[in-house]
Image: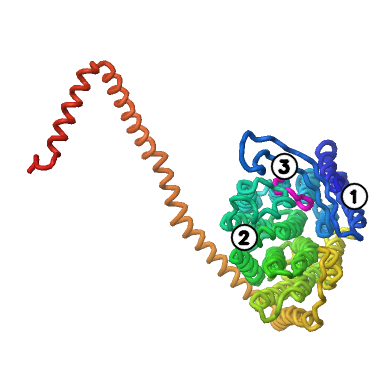
Amino acid sequence: MPVIVVVPLATFVIALSSVRTRRSSANLAMFGAVVMLLVTLLVGWGLAKRTAPFIATYSYINVPVAFSGPANFQSFVIEIVLRMDHITVAALVAVELCVIGALGWHLAMGRSEPGPARFHALVSLLLFACAGALVSRDLAELLAFWGLAGAITYLLLAHRWGLDEVAVRTRVALALPFATDLSLLCGVAWLYARYGLQNLTTLLPILHTNPGWTVRSLVVASVLLFVGVAGRLAFWPLHSWVTGTAAVASPAASAIVQAVWSVIGIVVLYRLMPIFVASNTQTLEACLYACAAAAAIAPLLALVGNEPRRVITLLGCGVVAVGAAIVVRGFQLPGSTFAVAGIALVLAAAPARAAGLLAASAIASAMRTDDLGEMGDAWRRMRVSAVALLLAGLVLSLSAVGAIAFALNSRSGLGLVTGEAVLLVSIGAIRVFLAVATGPLRRRRAFEPDRVREVAPGWPRVWPYWLAVGGVILLIASLIPRWLEFLDGSHHPAPSAGRYVLWLAVALVGFAAAAIAYTRNKDGALRASALSGSWLGRLLDGADRNVERYLVAPVAMIVARLDARWIPAGEGGIAGALDTTGRLTVAANRLPVVAVVIAIAVVLTVVVGLVAPGVLR
């Protein structure tokens, strides 16, 4: 287990100290990821026939505190706890496959990217942080790896730092996740302030038995932790840090970030859910409503606008929100075991999400446009990328079928919302493929259509295809109860065939609706999405202007006046008053004490006599 965490860190150190060229840095990063994958499979083989996890504990900080009180607060302890179970192994394998596929694609397609050695070193460091976050059992340890992964994420998304548009649009990738990560930090600090423990193994059993615990404290901790995880899962309305950078960041970086954070976020949410359950039913319902709203709104926004990478990003956000809703619902119902189906859903969607982004980036780069209205004919000119985009869209659309069949009833409110999400995701996924692969190519490179072809010859262009195939394998596994039983060790009754057919039919209806619309009038469908996108853009611009006019500008004016006029004037007045007080104090020290006391007594006597009852009358 320690080797899994040490390998990417050693790769980063080697890259930082000696590697400089593009090919050598890429080979080193790929070698570290492959070694990490092999070690993970070795650990998974050791866990295959046992239910108990592998646990390794290392004492990092143990500081006695000079305080007499509850035993939990007698010392401050941070332990490095490496816990490897079946879910962790599956999550690590999914993360490593996504990173390997993105690195293989970037080796050929990212030849013109700046700072290749820096990019590959950051990817290795991100792998180290992701492995640490997945195997962590101590909340302080989890927070440290989580924060490191967040910092590396911003550096990867802002890797094209020499371009003004990238520098401006990636600011949100720093500010918004930082706010949600701060919420996670506050949640961990709140739990430690109430319980004095950070290891989940010892913390979870005493949530309702520790002296001084209250439901309100658990509610506050649950809300803070949920906001922190939801920010990295890119739930609506916290999704702008991935949608705003999807088209300007390096394609490999965007694909790695979106795939990796979806896996980490869903696993961490699954492990923190016992804290949510210990709070109250209202908190669980609020989290469930938030996940359901994000699952429906994100793919609905994907139908607006014609930017393919933004559309794929929103579809992925909607699918991940469906998985989170199933996880929350599984813990909300006592005695249920289907919460792990949400993790299986996200594991299947992560490689497909990366494959879709890489394939769409290759097509957009070859056609020199990022507008679906100007794309077309990719099925004839760029067959491999088009097939990878189609497979990725199919996996994203169908990834929720098995999880919903295991978890939800079609007559329930949550079942209707998630069914709507599946319908919208299927429409959005197939519309991207139809817009790119069919119809005439309106945008030509220097009026030479024959130059629009696969940019990288040979094996590099096949990486998105293999990522999509990996998503297909995980999708098929998510339909099998034995896979869920392997992940959590619980018994999962197989759903009826009718439930599978029902949710599959929902996705097929979405495919048919998009196919009919784009077959009959592709230009009209694209114009409609473009007009709705421009309308939404104007609406958001108006909202930004109103916020600037009624909130930002008045606050800036108040700050300017305080800084330029009121604060100096107030400071001058306070200084004058203090100077006068000092002068009076110095003068009072020179007066005779007896005379002053007699004068004060006479004044007090006169005042008391005048205010006494009957004197003024």
Tell me which residue sits at (81%, 47%) in the image. 124
Identity, as a three-letter code, of the amino acid under mark 1: Val
Task: Say the numbered circle drawn on residue 279.
Answer: 2
The residue positioned 58% from the left and 66% from the top of the image is 282
Regarding residue 9, the answer to whether it shows in the image is yes
SS at mark 2 in the image: helix
Q: Amino acid at mark 3?
A: Ile
The answer to whether residue 437 of the structure is visible from this angle is: no
Q: Nearer the viewer, residue 289 or 378?
A: 289
Report x, y in % for residue 350.
Answer: 78, 62
Q: Which corner quadrant holds the C terminus?
A: top left
Question: Which stretch is magenta?
Answer: 133-140
Front in this rendered view, residue 276 or 125 = 276
Residue 262 place in picture, x, y as percent = 73, 60
Report helix, strand or loop for mark 1. Answer: helix
Q: Residue 206, which numbered label?
A: none
- Mark on residue 35? 1
Name the residue that disc number 3 marks: 78
How far is mark 2 from mark 3, CA to CA? 25 Å
Upstream in sequence: badge 1 or badge 2: 1
Number of residues whose C-alpha sits closer than 10 Å to that of mark 3, classed few (under 14), some (14–19) or many (20 or more): some
Position above or below: 290 against 256? below
**Horizontal arrangement in the rendering, residue 340 relative to residue 186 (left or right):** right
Residue farthest to the left? 617
In the image, residue 359 sits, relative to residue 428, either above or below, namely above
Q: Are discs 1 and 2 less than 8 Å apart at CB? A: no
